[in-house]
Amino acid sequence: MSQQVRLGDLLGSSNIEKFRDFDMTEVQNVLIQLRETDAIDLAHAEFLQQQALRGADILAEYLAKMVKTVAHLEAELNKTRNKVSLEYVAPDGSRTTVDMKKWAGECSPEVVKVQEQLADAKGGKVALERKYEILVKAHHHFKDIAAGLRRTILGYSSGTTNTVPEGYE
């Protein structure tokens, strides 16, 4: 019997993942292979489809961790900003205004540190999302090639007629 894999195992136990340590080797290898390889026959096109899906699967797991990390850092940023604002007192002992508290919450070193972490996580998330999109599009590209090869070379028809719509002859 195979080992049980739970969603929590995929998401990880930490609220902030060490996303800089995500192993992108296999994904990069898939992207290189897809870029440098032409689908010369049906089996090859189907293999490239599978490779694209494998890379997308890896990225889907990483993206789930990135969403969790970004959400946690956004909450942490709000918490830190509010804490600094509430605790701020004018250094010269004069009356502390709402604007002074707000500005203190925006520019405190603790807030800036969390903002930098959040920016880093959001940048990583965008990079993973773009690679994921590329892999899904590559999968569909090779799927279309395989379908074309089935129709033209093998004479296979899936039962649908591929007539040209009227006006596009």
Image (cartoon, rainbow, N blue to C red):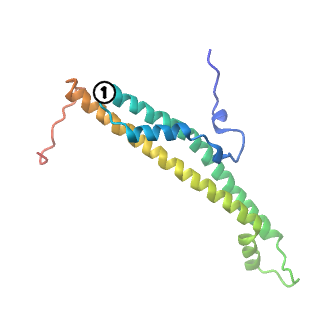
Question: In the image, residue 98 lies at what x, y percent?
Answer: 75, 78
**Amino acid at pointer 1:** Leu
Identity of the residue drawn at 73% across and 65% down: 111
Compared across the picture, whether 159 is left or right of 50 comes to left
- Quarter of the C terminus within the rendering: top left
**Which class describes the residues within 10 Å of circle 1: few (<14), some (14-19), or many (20+)?**
some
Return the residue at label 1. 42
Quadrant for residue 44, please give it.
top left
Question: In the image, residue 122 lies at what x, y percent?
Answer: 59, 55
Compared across the picture, whether 4 is left or right of 126 comes to right
Looking at this rendering, what residue extends furthest in the right direction?
93
Identity of the residue drawn at 60% across and 48% down: 67
Question: In the image, residue 158 lies at what x, y percent?
Answer: 25, 26
Identity of the residue drawn at 38% across and 40% down: 36
- Quarter of the N terminus within the rendering: top right
Q: Is residue 82 above or below residue 162?
A: below
Q: Is residue 96 above or below residue 120?
A: below
Q: Is residue 82 above or below residue 100?
A: above
Question: In the image, residue 51 lies at what x, y percent?
Answer: 44, 33
Quadrant for residue 164, please give it.
top left
Compared across the picture, whether 49 is left or right of 74 comes to left
SS at badge 1: helix
Looking at this rendering, what residue extends furthest in the front direction?
36
Compared across the picture, whether 5 is left or right of 89 comes to left
Identity of the residue drawn at 37% across and 37% down: 37
Choose between 169 and 50: the one closer to the eye.
Answer: 50
